Image (spheres, rainbow, N blue to C red):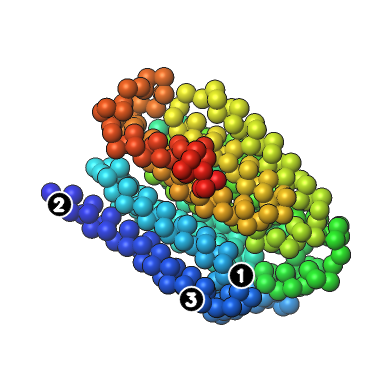
Amino acid sequence: MEKIGNEKLIGTISCLAVFVPFVIAVSTILELISMPPDSRSIFIKYYEWITAGSFTASVSYLVDPLSITMVLIVTGVGTLIHIYSIGYMHGDPGFAKFFAYLNLFIFAMLNLVLADNFLLIFLGWEGVGLCSYFLIGFWYQQKFTGDAAKKAFIVNRIGDFGFMTAMFFIFTYFSTLDVSVFNQKLAAYSVGDPLLLTIALLLFLGATGKSAQIPLFVWLPDAMAGPTPVSALIHAATMVTAGIYLVARTSLLYALSPFAMTVVFATGMLTAIVAAVIALRQNDIKKVLAYSTVSQLGFMFMALGTGTFWLAIFHLMTHAFFKGLLFLGSGSVIHGMHEEQDIRNMGGLKSKMKITFITFMIGTLAIAGIPPLRFLQ
C-alpha cells in the first residue's frame, strides 16, 4: 500500500509540473491574441550568461505565436502522456526515476522552443537528446534497449555537429547568437548569398538528426525499445519536431536561400516515400507507427521546403495529437497482449478492448484524413 501511495504522490507532482505550465501557456496565448497582430511577441532577457571578449550569450526568451504554439503542444500532450504513464509504469521499480526523466525532458524541450539565443536553443537541443538516451534505454537490463539508446545518441551527434558549425558561422559573420538580432541582420544580404546557403544547410543537417530524415532517420525505429509513453512523448509529439521548429524559427534565412529550400523539400519528399514503404513491411506494432512518424515528418519538411511554414507547424500540432494517441493505444494493446508486439498475433481485440478500439480508430481516421476528421490534415 505504501508503494502505491508513493506512486500516486510522484505521479501527481509530475503531472502538475507539466499541467501548470500548460495553464500559464493558455493565459499567455490569450494575452498575445489581445495584442495587435504585428506586435504579438514578448521578449524577456534575464541576464548575461556568458561573456568572453566580444562573445556574449544571454539567457533570453521570446514568446510569440510560434513558440507559444510549441509550448501548448509540449505541455498539453505532455500532461496527457504523464497521466497515462502513471498506470503504464505501475509497479516498475524505476517508477520515480522514469517520471524524473520525463519532467527533465519537458524542461529541456520548453527551453528549446522559448529560447531567443542559438546557444540556449542548443542547450535544450542537447537536453532532449540526453533525456531521450535515458528514456529509450530505461530498461537497460535488456541489451537491445541499451543498444537502441546508444544508436539514437550517436546518430544525433552527427546532426549536432552541423548545428554547432552553423553557430560558429553565425557568430563569426553576424557577431551575435541572438535569433532575433540574427534575423534583423539578414536584411543586409541578397537572395542566394553563399554564406546564408552554408548556414541554412548546416542547420538543416542538425534538423535531419533530430527529426529523423534521410540519411539520419535510422535511430528512430529502434527507439521504440523504450517504454511506450516515451514513444508517444518524445518520438511523436515533441523531440522529433525540434528540427521542424528550428527551420521554422529561421524561416527568413531559408526564404533567402532558394537552393536550401529545394534541399529541404527533396529530403522531406524522399523520406516520406521511403519510410512509408518500409512501414508496409513491419510486423512490430510500434515500428509501424515509428516509420509512419518518419514519413509524416517528411511531409512537414516538404511544407517547409515550399515556404508554407505555417502549414508545417499546423501539421506538427495535429500530428502530435493523433500520433501520440496511436502510440498510447498501441501501449494498451501490448499490455493487453502480455507484452506481445507482433501484429500478426493480434486480431479480434475489438470485443475485448472496446475503449482502446474506439480511441485507436479515432487516431487512425485522423492520420488518414477521413471525414469527419479530415480537417486535422
**Residues at marks 2 and 3, CA–CA distance in whole angstroms:** 44 Å
Q: Is residue 286 left or right of residue 217?
A: left
Against 176, residue 108 (above or below) is above
Residue at 70% over, 60% down: 251
| Residue position for label 1 | 116
**Residues at marks 1 and 2, CA–CA distance in whole angstroms:** 45 Å
Residue at 62% over, 53% down: 311
Which label's residue is closer to the chain start, 2 or 3?
Answer: 2
Residue at 13% over, 49% down: 1
Could you classify mark 3 by the number of other residues whose Cα lies within 10 Å: few (under 14), some (14-19), or many (20 or more)? few
In terms of secondary structure, where does tag 1 sit? loop
Image coordinates for residue 38, horizontal then vertical, percent: 64, 75
Quarter of the view holding residue 232? top left
| Residue position for label 3 | 31
Question: Label 2 amino acid?
Answer: Glu
Against 59, residue 358 (above or below) is above
| Cβ atoms under marks 2 and 3 closer than 8 Å | no
Q: Looking at the image, is mark 1 or mark 3 nearer the viewer?
A: 3
Image coordinates for residue 44, horizontal then vertical, percent: 55, 78
Residue furthest front as drawn: 372
Residue furthest left as drawn: 1
Count the marks: how many? 3
Of residues 135 and 82, the one drawn nearer to the viewer in this rendering? 82
Q: Quadrant of the C terminus?
A: top right
Image coordinates for residue 59, horizontal then vertical, percent: 57, 74
Could you classify mark 2 by the number of other residues whose Cα lies within 10 Å: few (under 14), some (14-19), or many (20 or more)? few
Question: Label 3 amino acid?
Answer: Glu
In terms of secondary structure, where does tag 3 sit? helix
Which label's residue is closer to the chain start, 1 or 2?
Answer: 2
| Residue position for label 2 | 2
Which label's residue is closer to the chain start, 1 or 3?
Answer: 3
Could you classify mark 1 by the number of other residues whose Cα lies within 10 Å: few (under 14), some (14-19), or many (20 or more)? many
